[in-house]
Structure formats: C-alpha cells, structure tokens
Amino acid sequence: MATGPPHPAIAKNTSFFWRNMHFKVEDEVFCVPLKEFVAASDSFEELVLKSELGGGDGSAEDCPVKIPGQSKVDFTALLKVLYPTASTLLSKNNAEIKLDLTKEEWIGVLKLSGLWGMTKIRDFALKNLSNVTLALSAIERIQLARSCCISNWLEDGIKALVQAERLDMDELKVLGWETVALLFCIRDTIARFSPSPTPTRFTLGSIKCVLCTGQACLIPLDPGEPTECPHCDRTLGRSSILCSADSTQGPNRKAGKVLLNSIRCPGTDHNPFSGETFTCRECKWDTREALQEFVRIEVSAPEFNILFDKYFGEEVERYEAL
Ligand SMILES: [Zn+2]
Ligand SMILES: [Zn+2]
C-alpha cells in the first residue's frame, strides 16, 4: 500500500466549534449549542446538566437532557436571545439589527434567565420589558415582580394602582384578596389624610426647624454627594423613612415634634445623625442651642413610599435578600 505524505494537522477553530446539546422541554426536543448556556450562567451545569431531572446526557436526540416544569414557548424565547439568527435579527427593511421578541417572549426569557442565574440576560430582559412600547399593565408588573422577585416593579405596580382614577375589581382579582385589601388601605389612608399629632414614622425631608416655620429640610442634603448613615451605610435622601424610638425616659415626641436624638433608622436602634448638628438655613437656629433638641416634623401628606414600606416592606426585603 502506497504511503503518501502525512495529513497536515487539523486545528479546531477557537471561536466556532460548538458542542450541540439535546434538550427536551414538554413534548419537544431542541438541538442547540451548549456554549451560551454555560457562558451566561455559572450555575447552569449544576442546575440543569448535573441535576437529577431525569433524561440523558443530551448527546443525541434519543437521550435529551430533560427540563421539566418549564414551557417550550419560554425556552424558545430564551434561545432567541442566546442564539439570535440573521432572520430574527434583521428588521424588515434591513436598516437595523434588532431582537424582535413579543412581550410574552420577554417574560419567558425573564423567567428562565432568573431561574438559571443568567444575570446579564435577565437584566437585558428587564430592560426590554421596561420599554414603554411593550406596555406592561400595573397588574402584570405586580405579577411579574412576584414570580421573578423584582422589588421595584412591585412598588411601581402598586403605586400605579393607588393613583389610578378607578379600579376594575374583575382585573384586580388575580392579585389575591390580601393584596387588594392592602392596596385599598393605602388609597384610603391617602384619601383621608390628616397629620399625625405625634409623628412616629416620617421622611427625612419632613424634618424641619423647631423655631421658625421655614419649609426647608433641616438636614442638608447634597444631591451630588449622597449622605450615608454611619451605622448601616444606608443612603439617606429626602424620601428615606425614619422613625422616632419609643420613649423610655420622658417623651420623645410631642405635638408635631420629635427629639432629634430619638430618631432611628427603622428597625434599628441607632440614630443616623448621631453626633451631627444642624443649622436652620432661615433663622440660623442651631441644634446645639438650648430648647432641647426637638425638631419639627411636618408631613405634607402621607407619602406613598411610607405606606408601601409599611404594607409591602417585608415582601420587598424577601426579594432583595435573594
Ligand atoms: Zn428656623
Ligand atoms: Zn442606619
């Protein structure tokens, strides 16, 4: 047998040499490269490939990796983002490159990317869903906030319903009676506002000089340089919620006033201003001067964020802890 020259070594292309995986979602098998799943998520292998979901190793059509409990429509939407193709990317007149997914598809992408720790893809889906053209309704925002743990969407959605001119009970039903009750509680509180004689919870912006009737906030806030609580590193702004500690020795509160050193970050026993002194911009009263360090709390109307925090604060904390 003739021996020719040895075959030249064949190199694998470093950018385009992808291993295909077979996934089974509902009653369909998908064959796609594994590359982007693992590039997008540190935990995909752990969560899907190595977990006990049943099925095969994904190497062939008849031994696919099974993904139970998810919809093939959502999975297809995620694939459109992981593997956009020319036909999905190019718009009709070829003038721009654009991923053209429907609202439902972006919701599917959001669900699965959150489930599988694909942070960048999840942020991308959130950004696309925030686009006004997709017009998420307040109720959809709340539902998504809950299924995907997005705390600011819960607040946006509740706020929109609190401010809505009228509400449709049939539409609200999907939120559950408890949420609807809390929602009406907030609407009712705002509608029947009368200032609390002894303030317990208030915003930082409502802390004012006790000597004059000036409307400026006594705590100077530089928008360019955020003020932080020295104890819990919380960023303090005009709308930050504070409270007055329950008085143990003598009253910390009297009509419309609280003792400056009784002010607390909610849920803690520290004063975010401990050691600081403040000067009224209008009458130059300095909190170091006599008259005890009472400050005036003037709340213009119950601010939505205080009420939201009161009724939905725990739920938000749960999402933010994730
Ligand atoms: Zn003053
Ligand atoms: Zn604090």
Image: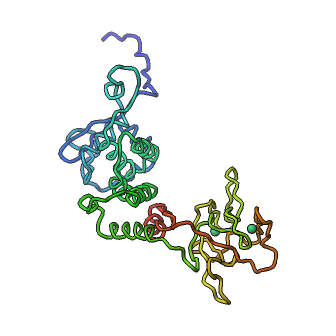
Q: Quadrant of residue 130?
A: top left
Residue displayed at 62% across by 80% down? 255
* Total labels drawn: 0
Residue displayed at 40% across by 70% down? 188
Q: In front: 29, or 50? A: 29
> In the displayed structure, does residue 99 sit left or right of residue 213?
left
Residue displayed at 76% across by 67% down? 278
Which quadrant of the figure contains the N terminus? Answer: top left
Residue displayed at 42% across by 50% down? 117
Q: Position of residue 51 (x, y in %)?
A: 33, 55
Q: In front: 121, or 22? A: 121
- Outermost residue to the front: 213
> In the displayed structure, does residue 156 sit left or right of residue 112?
right
Q: Position of residue 197 (x, y in %)?
A: 57, 79
Q: Quadrant of residue 12?
A: top left
- Outermost residue to the left: 27
> In the displayed structure, does residue 6 sit left or right of residue 76?
right
Q: Is residue 129 above or below residue 140?
A: above
Q: Is residue 240 above or below residue 34?
A: below
Of the four image quadrants, the one with ligand 1 is bottom right
Q: Position of residue 7 (x, y in %)?
A: 40, 16
Q: Is residue 161 above or below residue 38?
A: below
- Outermost residue to the bottom: 249
Q: In front: 225, or 101? A: 225
Q: How is the image coloured?
A: rainbow
Q: In front: 244, or 271? A: 244
